Image (spheres, grey):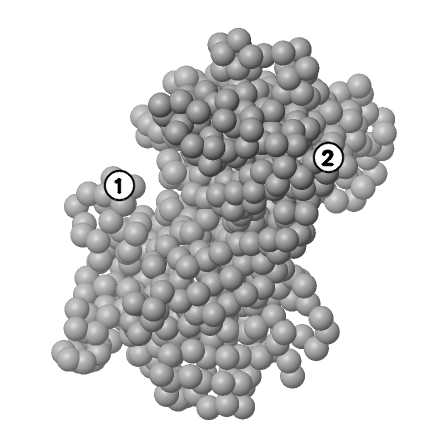
Amino acid sequence: MTILSYILQHTNLPERGVTNTLKLLNEDCTIPFISRYRKEMTGNLDEVAIGDIAKYKAAFEELEKRKETILKAIEEQEALTPELKKKIEQATTLIQLEDLYLPYKKQRTTRAAIAKKKGLEPLAKAIMKQQENNVDFIAEKYLTDEVTSVDEALKGARDIMAEWINENEHVRKRVRNLFSRKASISAKVVKAKKDEEEAQKYQQYFDWDEPLHKAPSHRLLAMLRAVNEGYVKLKVDVEKEEALDIIDDIVIKTDVESSTNQVFIAIEDAYKRLLQPAISNEVLKEAKEIADAAAIKVFSSNLRQLLLGAPLGEKRILALDPGYKSGCKVVCLDENGDLKHNENIYPHPPQRETAMAIKKIKSLVNAYDIEAIAIGNGTASRETEAFIKKIAFDRDLQVFVVNESGASVYSASKIARAEFPSYDVTVRGAVSIGRRLADPLAELVKIDPKSIGVGQYQHDVDQSKLKDELDTVVMSCVNTVGVNVNTASAPLLSYVSGIGNSLAENIVKYRTENNGIKSRKELLKVSRLGAKAFEQSAAFLRITNPEHPLDNSAVHPERYNLVEKMAKDHKVSVLQLIGNKELIKQLNLNKYCTDEVGLPTLTDIASELEKPGLDPRKKAKVFEFDKNIKTINDLKAGMKVPGIVNNITNFGCFVDIGIKESGLVHISKLATEFISDVNSVVQLHQHVMVTITEVDLARKRIQLSMID
């Protein structure tokens, strides 16, 4: 089996596209670079398809590595036959491999191993042939000082046979298939913890049973969390008789009663003691992996939407991190997001220095020529918003409420300390709120995605897979938007295709020492930024007011000559061609096709020339909550209120309606028609109107509906 056949077996992608993508991945090309600038090679595969190829490439390499380890281990035991070697080399899954390796694994001392030491293996082989009419008579031949009775000899022989049955790859395959089709998962409460307050959130799983393959991702992960916290016990099982019938069908060869009776006992023991626990754990692990994949998909989709959230742009912003007793931290940022001023105001109880707070805010707005105000959505957010909107400013100011999830994590981070070594966490948190309004992507890349709060059981899934997926999403978003090389932070630059942490630091150092970077060519002067890194990164890095007009576009430097030829053919300069829609429409793209450059790339170039460096994100819009709702106690069933979608799961979406608790719109309440994918109806940060359907004050839960 080759890597190509393995990937083609798992995907419906064209062979040529897979072959060329593998070649590019082996040359250390990144997914964003391949999907954007090597379309002719891949057959115009998108990031998702290229990402799948990369994942299956990694899986194949892991499989091949495991094969090498197993072959070496069996060879060292001098047990590797040509037939077994062929089976191992042809295995297409890790499960197949482990089944083949099971009989050769170095295990702890087992009952079978003890019986073998007592010399009972020949007896087990004789019985397993199922030809002997009197096993008691044969067993007497194996009595020794260690084996003092026929019953003891037969028991030892059955232990050996049970191990053989457990290690039989056909038995394991058939039993595994039964579990995959018919296993049920049941949960029972741990009575000792039943009455604990924390246990109540898992109450529905105190006595639960359903087919394992029908358990949705969120429910399985909830049950597993309940197990980890000690509130319930789980069992995964199938009908015992059906499993035993399957094993009997494989193992029982004759109707010689004396022998087969012993084999039947061994089969039941093998299933109960070895097969059932192992296979049930295996299928539960597989179900968990599927649930993890679903949860990771939800999280990554939410993260993408969050990172590509609407930016306000380069504006002078006054940001407030609201609070009561400790006051509201106020910071003033310039259009580049640099901190110009910070102080505290106390517009709320217990101090309530309202007049002084109004005076300070008005003074700061004028002194720093503020264009917009950002307010964190945490404690005292609604009161602070109301306070700000009562102030009579001498200019029109948009007031935005900003989701501050993860701001506290950022403010205590190494990145924040490096950015603001002289300021405490309250100042850093307020700066983060303001910068999120200006550019969510640039600010959120500084925070561990798990701390942003837009996932579903993100702390319960495989953390390595979650990190890989989220890193891929962040890189995709950063490169989709593009980065200003002279203003981007090192964390933002590190996600640019081909850059990474060390080169990002080197870019920041170079631009600081040289008063900025004036052209893409100049990037090659950055320490350790060689030709390969330049090829991968240059088109994603933007330079405002550049020496070459294309340096502020997504056109790759390797295609500048092509654009210059287009301009020359129409007797204009490149600068005159950029933005000239009429002239660009007149371009005969077929004329510029070569062996390396086809219509997909040329079409991208033409689109980019029309609107060079265009930010694909929408612009930020002001949103207002219902002024009459301040707490959950103000809610009544039947009320219609505005809200913002702040989290999406497989079972529905959560909506911020301006109070501490978000409400849930169950998937069944999103639309009148059947919905299978929540993202097909709502997006993160979408402004929606919802109806209050139920308010549970005791558990602080709010049920909402979007059906009119």
**Where does the C terminus fall, quadrant-wise?**
bottom right
Q: Is 507 or 699 nearer to us in this picture?
A: 699
Residue 583 visible? The answer is yes
Q: Nearer the viewer, mark 1 or mark 2?
A: 2
Q: Residues within 10 Å of mark 2 (few under 14, many from 20)?
A: few
Residue 561 in the image: above or below residue 408: above
Q: Amino acid at mark 2?
A: Thr
Q: Is 564 or 251 nearer to us in this picture?
A: 251
Q: Residue at x 47, y 23 (%)?
A: 142
**Where does the N terminus fall, quadrant-wise?**
top right
Q: Is 45 or 125 nearer to us in this picture?
A: 125
Circle 1: element type: helix
Separation of residues labelled 1 and 2 (CA atoms): 71 Å
Residue 266 lies left or right of residue 359; in this view the side is right
Circle 2: element type: loop
Q: Amino acid at mark 1?
A: Lys
Sooner in the amino-acid sequence: mark 1 or mark 2: 2
Q: Residues within 10 Å of mark 1 (few under 14, many from 20)?
A: few
Q: Which residue is mark 1?
A: 414
Q: Position of residue 592 (x, y in %)?
A: 81, 25
Residue 428 in the image: above or below residue 703: above
Residue 624 lies left or right of residue 86; in this view the side is left
Q: Which residue is mark 2?
A: 254
Q: Position of residue 468 (x, y in %)?
A: 49, 38
